[in-house]
C-alpha cells in the first residue's frame, strides 16, 4: 500500500497546486517529501527540509493542507512533520501538525491567470501574490525613503480614500521599491481581508494579456483586472515597447480610478521619462502622488544590516557592518546578498566573521570601485566637512555658512550625478533650478581665485574616492 499512499499524497499536491500560484507551490509545497502513512492511527508523515518551512506552512497554509488531506486520505487524518534540523549530521525532529477540523474547500484562485467567462462573471477569492516577508516591520526608515514609506502606510490604512491615488514610486534598482509596494499590499490585506488586493509584475501582466489575445478571451482578462480593489504593478517601464499592453492597461486603470479603487505603480524612472507611454496614461500617473526612492545612504545601510542581524540571530562585528554599508553600492539587495554570502563562507570554511572575510566576499559580490553617488552621499559628506546639519542647510536661513554648504552641495550634485538642475534644487531644500545654476556658477568662480576653498572642495571629493 506504500505506493498507494504515495499516490494519494501526489493527488494532494495536485489539489494544492490548483489553489496557489506556481511560485508559492515551488517554494513551500514542492520540497515536502512523503515518508509514510499509518492506517492504524490515520497519521501521515512527511519530511520538510528546514524548521522555517514547517513554521511557514503551519502559519499560512494549514487550512489548505487540511482540506487537501481530507479530500484524499479521508477525515480525522493527522499530519506529522519530520523536520531536518541539521543536514550535516543527519539530525531530524518529528513534530505533529495542528490541522483544523471542518475546513471548507477553498475557491481556486488560478494564480494570476485570466479567468474564464464563467469565472469573470462572479469575483472569486484571489491569491494576492504578495511576499509575506516584505512588510513594514522590516522596511527600515531613513532619509531616502521617509516620504514614500509614510505615504505607503497611509494608503494601506485607507486604500482609495486618500489623494495619493495613483501612488507612483520610482527609483534605481535595489532601493526598496518592491519591498515598499509589497508592504502596502500586505498591510492593506491585514486590515481589509475582504478587499481584492493583487500584486503583479508588468511582465506577468503582459504575458497574461498575450495569452488572452491568443485564446480570444481579452474581455475576460480586462473584467478580471477591473474587479480588483487594490492593484499593485511593479516595473511598468517594461511596457515601453508594448503599445497594445499599454492600451489595455489604460482601460483597466481608467475603470479602477473612476470607481475609487487604489492603484500603486513602481518604475525605475519617473513618468516624464517613460518612453513609449502615451500622454493620456502619463497624465493619469501624475494626478496622484509621485514619490522617489533614492539609494540608501551609509547610515540607513547600517540600520538595515543591524535589523537583519537582529531578525536572523546573526552576530556580526560593528566594524564589519560599517565596512559593508560603505561599500555595498547603496543597494538593499547587495546588502542582503553580502550578508548571506558572508554567513555561507563562515560556515563552509569555518572562518570568523571579520574584516578579512568581508573584504573577500565584497570583492566577489560587489563592484566596490563603481559606487554611484546620490544626493544623500553628497549632502552627508559636505555637511560633515563644514560642521553643519542637513536641516540647517535645508532651512530658509541666509546665514553665510549654510548658504555656502548649500551651494557646494548643489555644485557637487551637478558635477557627479546625472540629475537635472530642477531635481537637484528640489532635493536640496526645495529650491528652483535657477538657484542651482547660480550656486554652481558661484562655486566655479570662487574655485578659480580661492586656493584654500579649492583645497576644501578637493578634500570633500577625495572622501568619495572619486577622480576629478
Image (cartoon, rainbow, N blue to C red):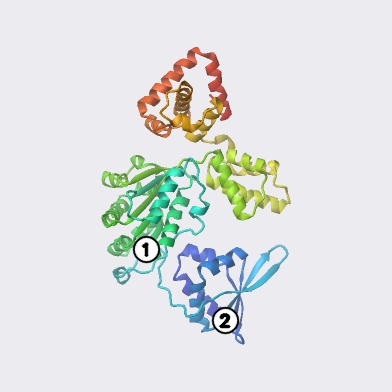
Density class for disc 1 (Cα within 10 Å; few <14, some 14-19, many ≥20) is: some
Density class for disc 2 (Cα within 10 Å; few <14, some 14-19, many ≥20) is: some
Q: Quadrant of residue 328?
A: top right
Numbered tag placed on residue 291 in the rendering:
none
Q: Position of residue 161 (x, y in %)?
A: 32, 54
Element under disc 2: helix
Q: Is residue 323 left or right of residue 218?
A: right
User: Height in image: 315 above or below 384?
Assistant: below
Q: Is residue 337 visible?
A: no
User: Height in image: 299 above or below 167?
Assistant: above
Q: Position of residue 31 (x, y in %)?
A: 57, 67
Q: Please count the marks in the image.
A: 2
Element under disc 1: loop
Q: Residue at x 40, y 46 (%)?
A: 169
Q: Is residue 200 left or right of residue 38?
A: left
Whether residues under marks 1 and 2 lie with C-beta atoms below 8 angstroms apart, the answer is no
User: Height in image: 5 above or below 179?
Assistant: below
Q: Nearer the viewer, mark 1 or mark 2?
A: 1
Q: Is residue 109 left or right of residue 458?
A: left
The residue under label 2 is 5
Q: Position of residue 7 (x, y in %)?
A: 54, 79
Q: Is residue 346 visible?
A: yes
Q: Position of residue 377 (x, y in %)?
A: 52, 34
Mark 1 or mark 2: name the one nearer the start of the chain.
2
Quadrant where the N terminus is found in the figure? bottom right
In this rendered view, identify the residue nearer to me: 426 or 355: 426
The residue under label 1 is 195
Q: Quadrant of residue 433?
A: top left
Q: Quadrant of residue 199?
A: bottom left
Amino acid at each position: 500500500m506504500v505506493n498507494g499512499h504515495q499516490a494519494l499524497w501526489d493527488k494532494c499536491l495536485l489539489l494544492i497546486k490548483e489553489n496557489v500560484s506556481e511560485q508559492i507551490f515551488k517554494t513551500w509545497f514542492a520540497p515536502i517529501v512523503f515518508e509514510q502513512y499509518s492506517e492504524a492511527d490515520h497519521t501521515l508523515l512527511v519530511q520538510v527540509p528546514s524548521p522555517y518551512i514547517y513554521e511557514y506552512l503551519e502559519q499560512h497554509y494549514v487550512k489548505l493542507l487540511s482540506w487537501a488531506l481530507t479530500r484524499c486520505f479521508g477525515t480525522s487524518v493527522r499530519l506529522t512533520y519530520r523536520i531536518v534540523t541539521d543536514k550535516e549530521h543527519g539530525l531530524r525532529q518529528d513534530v505533529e501538525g495542528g490541522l483544523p477540523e471542518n475546513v471548507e474547500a477553498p475557491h481556486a484562485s488560478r494564480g494570476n491567470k485570466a479567468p474564464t467567462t464563467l469565472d469573470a462573471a462572479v469575483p472569486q477569492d484571489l491569491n494576492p501574490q504578495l511576499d509575506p516577508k516584505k512588510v513594514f516591520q522590516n522596511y527600515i526608515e531613513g532619509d531616502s525613503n521617509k516620504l514614500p514609506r509614510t505615504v505607503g502606510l497611509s494608503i494601506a490604512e485607507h486604500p482609495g480614500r486618500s489623494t495619493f491615488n495613483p501612488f507612483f514610486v520610482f527609483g534605481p534598482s535595489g532601493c526598496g521599491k518592491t519591498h515598499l509596494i509589497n508592504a502596502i499590499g500586505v498591510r492593506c490585506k491585514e486590515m481589509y481581508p475582504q478587499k481584492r488586493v493583487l500584486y503583479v509584475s508588468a511582465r506577468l501582466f503582459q504575458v497574461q494579456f498575450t495569452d488572452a489575445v491568443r485564446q480570444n478571451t481579452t474581455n475576460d482578462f480586462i473584467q478580471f483586472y477591473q474587479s480588483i480593489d487594490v492593484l499593485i504593478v511593479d516595473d511598468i517601464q517594461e511596457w515601453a515597447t508594448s503599445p497594445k499592453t499599454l492600451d489595455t492597461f489604460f482601460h483597466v486603470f481608467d475603470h479602477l480610478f473612476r470607481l475609487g479603487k487604489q492603484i500603486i505603480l513602481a518604475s525605475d524612472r519617473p513618468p516624464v521619462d517613460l518612453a513609449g507611454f502615451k500622454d493620456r496614461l502619463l497624465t493619469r500617473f501624475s494626478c496622484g502622488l509621485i514619490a522617489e526612492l533614492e539609494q540608501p545612504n551609509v547610515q540607513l545601510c547600517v540600520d538595515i544590516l543591524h535589523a537583519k542581524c537582529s531578525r536572523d540571530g546573526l552576530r556580526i562585528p560593528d566594524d564589519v557592518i560599517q565596512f559593508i554599508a560603505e561599500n555595498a553600492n547603496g543597494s538593499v539587495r547587495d546588502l542582503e546578498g553580502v550578508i548571506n554570502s558572508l554567513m555561507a563562507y563562515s560556515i563552509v570554511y569555518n572562518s570568523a566573521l571579520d574584516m578579512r572575510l568581508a573584504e573577500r566576499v565584497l570583492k566577489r559580490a560587489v563592484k566596490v570601485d563603481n559606487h554611484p553617488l546620490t544626493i544623500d552621499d553628497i549632502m552627508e559628506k559636505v555637511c560633515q566637512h563644514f560642521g553643519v546639519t542637513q536641516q540647517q542647510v535645508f532651512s530658509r536661513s541666509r546665514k553665510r555658512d549654510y548658504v555656502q554648504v548649500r551651494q557646494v552641495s548643489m555644485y557637487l550634485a551637478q558635477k557627479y550625478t546625472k540629475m537635472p538642475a530642477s531635481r537637484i534644487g528640489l532635493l536640496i531644500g526645495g529650491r528652483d533650478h535657477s538657484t542651482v545654476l547660480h550656486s554652481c556658477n558661484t562655486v566655479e568662480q570662487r574655485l578659480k581665485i580661492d586656493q584654500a576653498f579649492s583645497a576644501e572642495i578637493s578634500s570633500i571629493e577625495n572622501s568619495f574616492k572619486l577622480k576629478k
